[in-house]
Amino acid sequence: MQSHVTELAYEALDLYEVSDCQSIAHSIKQKFDEAYGAAWPCVVGKDFGSCITHLCGSFIFFHVEMMEFLIFKNGKDFTESKEEAIGVLQKSKQIDS
């Protein structure tokens, strides 16, 4: 999952101006939603804070040059089953292999 999102970040940076953080984040979010199911918020910028709730094992924060990237599986809906959360992690391992 980490290598996938890093790859998506580089692709988005090639497609959009570095200053267009919203388009970069939207591109990454759409592709992550397609790959791992819905509810993957993405934040991109040079300096930001956050206070979020996320599912265990679904929080990724990294840098590409001067840009910071945060992507996570939304954890506000606690009706999701443990099996569904495990399914997200298993799916990510299959894609990374």
Image (spheres, rainbow, N blue to C red):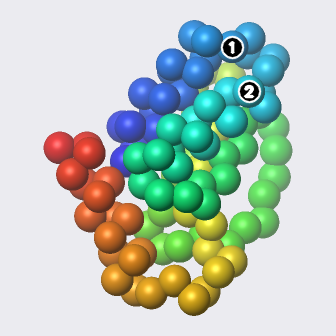
User: Does 75 sit left or right of 36 as displayed?
Assistant: right
Q: Is residue 19 visible?
A: yes
Q: Secondary structure at mark 2?
A: helix
Front-lying residue, 79 or 58: 79
Give me the residue at 25% from left, 54% from top: 93
Looking at the picture, which amino acid does disc 1 mark?
Tyr
Residue located 48% across and 62% down the image: 58
Element carrying mark 1: loop
Quarter of the picture holding the C terminus: top left
State whether residue 68 appears in this view.
no
Image height of 7 relative to 89, above or below: above
Circle 2 sits on which residue?
A: 23
**What residue appears at the point 81 percent right and 17 percent down from the top-left corner?**
19
Q: CA distance from mark 1 to mark 2?
A: 7 Å
**Is the residue 37 above or below the residue 96 in the image?**
below
Residue at point 32%, 54% (across, down): 92
| First in residue order: circle 1 vs circle 2 | 1
With 75 as the anchor, is 56 left or right in this view? Answer: left
Residue 79 spot, x, y in % from top left: 57, 89
Which residue lies under the disc numbered 1? 16
| Picture layout, residue 25 above or below residue 96 | above
Give the residue type at disc 2: Ser
Q: Residue 73, image x and y in percent?
A: 56, 62
* 25 relative to 28 in the view: left or right: right
